[in-house]
Image (tube, rainbow, N blue to C red):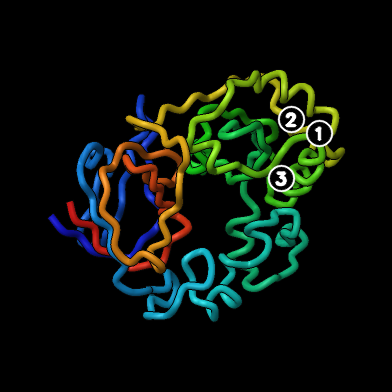
Amino acid sequence: MKYQGVLKKMKTENLEEIQYYLDMKSDFLNINQLLNREVTISFVTYECLNCHLEKKIYRQGFCKNCFFEIPNAADWIMRPELSTAHLDVEDRDLAYEKSVQLQPHIVYLANSSNVKVGVTRKGQIPTRWIDQGAHEAIEIVEVPNRYLAGITEVALKNYVGDKTNWRKMLKNDIEDENLLEWREKLKQYIPDEAKQYFIENNTETHINFPVLKYPDKPKSLNLIKTPSYTGKLVGIKGQYLIFEDETVFNVRSNEGLVVSIEV
C-alpha cells in the first residue's frame, strides 16, 4: 500500500500503550499497525501548513513568509512569558492571541531524558507529554493565562532543565524520578503572582510507548539529504519513528514536507 500527504505531527491516543495516527489527507494511518514491517518514506515536495503553497519550509511547517506573519508562529508560542493578550496588547492578531493565551495553562514537570519544566494549555495534557516522549509527568501549577505560566517556567528553569535530550530519550537511557518530591522542592521558587495556583494534591502520570527495540546510537533521518529511506519500524516514541537499523525520523520537525509512505 502507498499513501501520500503533507506531514503534520502524529495524533495520539492515551491508552494502555500509546496509539499513533498519521493524517495523510485521504488516509488516516494507525502507525502502531506498521510495527515490525518494512516501511519506505520518500520526499515528494513541500506544502506550507498555512498557505498550502509549494514553498520551501522555513520553520514549524511554515514557509518563510507565513512564519514571520501568522499569529500561530509568533515568539510567544515558544516563549510564553512574552504573551501580552492579558494586557489587551496585540502582537500579530489580538483576537487569535486572546483565544489561545487567555485560557488555563499548566506548568508541569516531565521526565523524558531528565526532569524538565514545561508549559502547555490545559487541554493539551497529556498530549504534550506524549509528544515529548516523557514516561512520567506531573502538573505543578494551573494558571488562568499563558503569561503567568511563562514567568513561572522562566523562574523554575533556574533550578531544573527545560530541554529534552532526544538521543537519551530515544535510547531509553532514563531513570525514574519522584516528581512529587521535585514539585515540593520547586514550590518555593514559583513567582508570587502564581503561588496561589500551585496544585497541592495530584499524582504522577505514567506513559507507555509502543517500542519493540530501542536504538543504542540513534541517527536522524534527513529526508532532504536522503530523499528515500526504507527500514523496519520497531518503535514510536515522542514524535519519532524508530527503525531497526537505529535510524530515527522526527515527524514533527518535518511538518510541511509532502511524503509518500509505502508499506
Q: Is mark 1 on a helix, strand or loop?
A: helix
| Image spot of residue 87 (x, y percent) | 77, 61
Which of 35/138 is in front? 35
Q: In which quarter of the view is residue 76 placed?
A: bottom right
Q: Mark 1 points at which residue?
A: 195
- Left or right: 117 with respect to 41? right
> Which residue is painted at 71% across and 61% down in the image?
85
Q: Position of residue 226 (x, y in %)?
A: 36, 64
Mark 3 residue crowding within 10 angstroms, few (<14) / some (14–19) / many (20+): many
Left or right? Give the position of 211 relative to 79.
Answer: left
In the rendering, at what x and y percent does residue 258 appear? Answer: 32, 68
Disc 2 secondary structure class:
loop
Label disc, if present, on residue 149 of the rendered structure: 3
Which amino acid is tagged 3? Ala
Contact flag, marks 1 and 2 (Cβ < 8 Å): yes
Q: Name the residue under label 2.
A: 198
Residue drawn at point x = 72 percent, y = 24 percent: 182
Give the structural element (helix, strand or loop) at label 3: helix
Decide if residue 29 is on the left or right side of residue 6: left
Q: How far apart are marks 1 and 2 (CA)?
A: 6 Å
**Mark 1 closeness class: few <14, some 14–19, many ≥20 residues within 10 Å:** some
Could you tell me how far apart the alpha carbons at marks 2 and 3 are, in whole angstroms? Answer: 11 Å
Q: Residue at x 55, y 37 (%)?
A: 168
Amino acid tagged 1: Lys
10 Å neighbourhood of mark 2: few (<14), some, or many (≥20)? some
In terms of image quadrants, where is residue 27?
bottom left
The residue at the point 43 percent across, 46 percent down is 239
Q: In this view, does 138 lie to the left or right of 230?
A: right
- Give the quadrant of the N terminus: bottom left
Amino acid on which disc 2 is placed: Phe
